[in-house]
Amino acid sequence: MRKVSKAKLLDKVSAKLVKPEWAERVVSPAYDMLRATEREKLMDEDPYVFLHVTSAKSSLPVEARTAANNEALKRLFDAGAYSDTLNSALYLYKLSYEGHQQTAIVGDISIEAFEDGRVIPHERTREFRANDLANHLENIGIHSSPVALAYDDDKEVNALIQEAMESKPVLDFCREDNLEQTIWRVPDQIADKLLTLFQDKTTFIVDGHHRVHASHTVWDRSGKSERYGKILGALFSADELKIRSFHRHVSDLNNLTPKNLTTRIAEMDFHIEPVQDTEGHEPEYAGQFSMFLDGSWYKLSPQRIHPSELDAVILQKRILHPILEVDEEGSDGRLHYLPGTIPLGYLESITQSEGGVAFALHPVSMDQLQAIINRKKTLPPKSTYFEPKVRSGIFIINR
């Protein structure tokens, strides 16, 4: 019986690249790094920032948002911000921030690799968000924000990356956020060796679960056409990654008073302790939460906890769902996620101005995450935040 060969996990990609003189102006933070007000502020400041392609003013109806995205992409092309489509290649993408560096191999990732177990998810997705992204992909027809994947450290891969970085980069720029971004085109001889090394590797999704879900949806809708059979990916060595948490803000107390809420939380077997102003507000260890409620901070510690239960799961199962009646999809618009890179003072000010309650979480460790992946389990949406995050608008791939 003839053996069916697996699709390539990693392949070269034919991409347009932002031109060096446009990079600082165009390349934008990832969508989920910013709240809607922050995104709209950046968009108001510059008509060429790439957020105009990936986002739109929340006040616009859906049809108008799609039109605005397409107009923004045309505006960038008309201005000459991008190269012509280049011959297929792999790229290296190095991000440097505050002394930390991480380097990805950028190319096309086969959707089939997500089905056959070579790419493993670790977070569940919110259906409404994935559908929004799927519709966006179908309407605009490009990939521009690489999905971040991780692989186990590999000396052969490291050596090839170092060899490829001996050439002159095609892009090297730094925006006002002080993140230095450097891009190399990988010579074909080195790229071919990397493709072979990655053929049978097992990887896991670091960032971009919703984009993967969306791309898979579009692939299914198209009858699994070759056109939509790949997604732009950035492959990082797992030992280079830094994990932060995602904090939660719930915009109301589900008709409870602050006192009633703390009582209900205590009934769910949590020890609650007020935090003095002189103390730090960050959770000190896994299993402890910080809560901002009615102008004050509290530390929450569950009295009993199973070793395999991670913080995002505990919070969802014991507080958010049973007490505040918030599902993990956040489909009613009451649940908001904020990356752990923001100061807790910002989380505090949002809660004071918009009401409700906020929870700060301790980051998941890489060992905890690997254990989840090895057991083929998944966490609630937005349980991990990896930094620095890949940016949008460096590459444009037509689909």
Image (cartoon, rainbow, N blue to C red):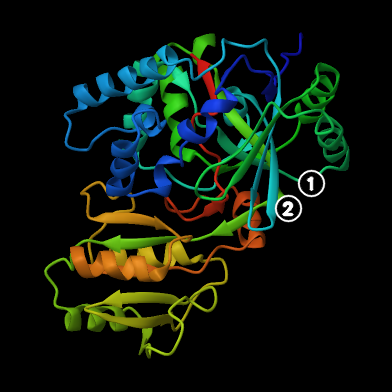
Q: Nearer the viewer, residue 291 or 86?
A: 86
Q: Nearer the viewer, residue 118 or 97?
A: 97
Are dots 2 and 1 in contact, CB under 8 Å?
yes
Residue occupied by mark 2? 239
Q: Nearer the viewer, residue 4 or 138?
A: 138
Q: Which class describes the residues within 10 Å of circle 1: few (<14), some (14-19), or many (20+)?
A: few
Above/below status of 219 relative to 386:
above
**In the image, which disc is placed on residue 153?**
1
From this viewpoint, is residue 237 visible? no
Residue 56 horizontal side relative to residue 134, left or right = left
From this viewpoint, is residue 130 visible? yes
Dot 2 or dot 1, earlier in sequence: 1
Q: Which class describes the residues within 10 Å of circle 2: few (<14), some (14-19), or many (20+)?
A: few
Q: Amino acid at mark 2?
A: Asp
Residue 56 % position (x, y): 28, 32
Q: Which residue corresponds to the image point at 50% horizontal and 31% vertical from the top-left?
A: 145
Which residue is farthest front?
A: 21
Which residue is farthest left?
A: 255
Give the structural element (helix, strand or loop) at label 2.
helix
